Image (tube, helix red, strand yellow):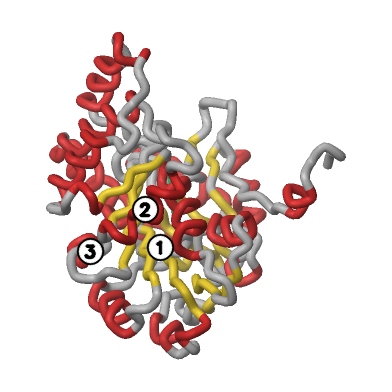
Amino acid sequence: MSAYWSDFVKTLDPYVPGEQPKQTDLIKLNTNESPFAPSPAVLDAIRQATADQLRLYPSPESDRLRAAVARYYDLSEDQVFPGNGSDEVLAHLFLGLFRHQGKQILFPDITYSFYPVYCRLYDIDYQNVALADDFSIRLQDYLALPPETVSAVIFPNPNAPTGMAIGRDEIEQLLIQRPQWVVAVDEAYVDFGAQSCVPLIKKYKNLVVLQTLSKSRSLAGLRVGFAFAQPELLEGLVRVKNSFNSYPVDRLAEAGAIAAFEDQSYFEQTTREIVQTREQLSEAMRALGFTVLPSKANFIFVSHSQYDAAQLLASLRSHAILVRHFRHPRIASFLRVTIGTKKQCETLIKSLSEIVS
Ligand SMILES: *Cc1c(COP(=O)(O)O)cnc(C)c1O
């Protein structure tokens, strides 16, 4: 704490990302990155973009990228809002759409821990809605709250860190029954088996869908994410963006992101492999006595009735394997394990069978 800090900064409680270790020989299953390199076409595109053009500012609204993504999802360009990772897009969403005097936003008690951080940063009142006992999101519990005190709902689908997904039909019911609420669906992990709400964008004025290239497209280091919604709503995000940073997507990121959407076969091959490995790893973990929540993401959420999660985390670390543990009391007995390569997951199972036998 420094006397130079503003009073406001002294009150902040920032997000703590998973460890990015300096040691390079660790099996890193702690931050839901892809174990695969980006598509070779992405690396080529980035290399080409490093030429003379880097002197010049990028397109402020990332026009080429918006056009490519709109084509990919059968949207119009003005339904696509890109940003410097979906975390930045989320920040603009909280400030631009969620900050309403005298109203709250709703999100699950167990979810992405950046949401309460943005609420504090932008002074937004929120209420947590508890997940069901089986850790699923129950949208009827949101509908049971008095609608007039709420401005918006946000949840990831699949949820993090549980990995559990809900169906598009259920979300559509919420959109229909609460047209006065903004419904934001954070689809960071949707490509690993959940139903996307992107096809509903044309139909519902109150829907925002967020996606990222960080997980299913192996580009966490490039920092590109999106919001999809109808133009009138997105214009609110554009206003925030142009009051903060006019050029959030740099030239290398724009070139790489376009190429990522063009290489469909690489995307399908790598996501398919992660889904297969997830199912194999889930089965192997159950055989070792773990409870494994049903995941539609690139991670699994597991607990063991006889072993303390924090101790398992430490034991795995001594086997050079990193996983993630969260302190929230409801999930303190769980570990989140990112799906690695088949070989990494085999090493994990070998280590765990030594630890829990
Ligand atoms: C990883 C993640 C993000 C952030 O993704 P970036 O695009 O890398 O900023 C957003 N939401 C959820 C739920 C995530 O897990």
The spot of residue 126 in percent (x, y) is 58, 71
Q: Which mark is residue 13?
A: none
In front: label 2 or label 3: 3
Residue at 32% over, 48% down: 81
**Front residue of 13 and 195:** 13
Left or right of residue 223, residue 17 in this image: right
Question: Are dots 2 and 1 in contact, CB under 8 Å?
Answer: yes
Q: Earlier in the sequence, mark 3 or mark 1?
A: 1
Mark 2 is surrounded, within 10 Å at the Cα level, by few (under 14), some (14 to 19) or many (20 or more) other residues, namely: many
Q: Is residue 221 above or below residue 181?
A: above
**Front residue of 308 and 135:** 135
Identify which amino acid the numbered label 3 is placed on.
Ile
Q: Which residue is mark 3?
A: 201
Residue at 30% over, 45% down: 216
Left or right of residue 159, residue 109 in this image: right
Observer able to see residue 77: yes
Q: Is residue 44 above or below residue 306?
A: above
Q: Is mark 1 within 8 Å of ligand 1?
A: yes
